[in-house]
Amino acid sequence: MKKILLIYLLFIVVSCNFLKDGIEIEISNNSKVPLKNLKFSTSENKEVLTFKELKSGEKINEFLSMKDNKTDGSFSLEFTNQKGEIKKLTAGYYSNGKPLDNKIIFMIQNDTTLIKIN
């Protein structure tokens, strides 16, 4: 009986994402131009990752802490392209301040951005 209760408790903890306090991100610049002023954040803007520049062919791997997030929301990536245009992408979802996924991958191309969520 104790074993069943332990398994049940472990299932609750894992399924409610109590072990996660953030999300991994990967941003790959597969375009031919550098990207400037990159900003990755939650819709609550409690924690923000910023990067001054991501050159063509470069990749960023980081972890966004979400310890201060409390509500439901999504993630966004904002950057400035070579023409000075600000691009904003929204991806993923979190509930009660906890991410539903482990990692978001942004693959920025010349004319589009591919997003993969693990």
Image (spheres, rainbow, N blue to C red):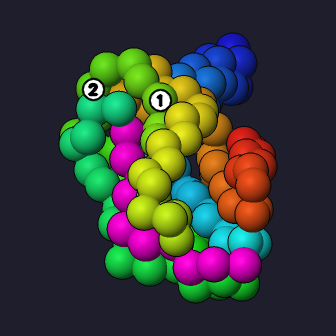
Q: CA distance from mark 1 to mark 2?
A: 12 Å
As displayed, is residue 15 above or below residue 22?
A: above
Of 64 and 76, nearer the camera is 76
Quadrant housing residue 42: top left
Q: Residue at x 61, y 24 (%)?
A: 15
Q: Position of residue 9 (x, y in %)?
A: 57, 23
Q: Position of residue 47 (x, y in %)?
A: 27, 50
Disc sitting over residue 107 in the figure: none
Image marks 1 and 2: residues in contact by CB distance under 8 Å: no
Q: Specify whether residue 52 is in view.
A: yes
As displayed, is residue 67 above or below residue 55?
A: above
Mark 1: few/some/many CA within 10 Å (<14, 14-19, 20+): some
Mark 2: few/some/many CA within 10 Å (<14, 14-19, 20+): some
Say which amino acid is labelled 2: Lys
Say which amino acid is labelled 1: Ser
Helix, strand or loop for the magenta stretch, by majority: strand
Q: Which residues are magenta?
A: 32-42
Of 35 and 70, nearer the camera is 35
Quadrant housing residue 24: bottom right
Q: How many marks?
A: 2
Side of 9 relative to 76 (left or right): right
Q: Which residue position holds label 2?
A: 70
Is residue 106 covered in magenta? no
Side of 37 relative to 108 (left or right): left
Q: Which residue position holds label 1?
A: 74
Q: Residue at x 65, y 18 (%)?
A: 8
Which of the two discs, 1 and 2, sits closer to the camera?
A: 1
Identify the image quadrant of the C terminus. top right
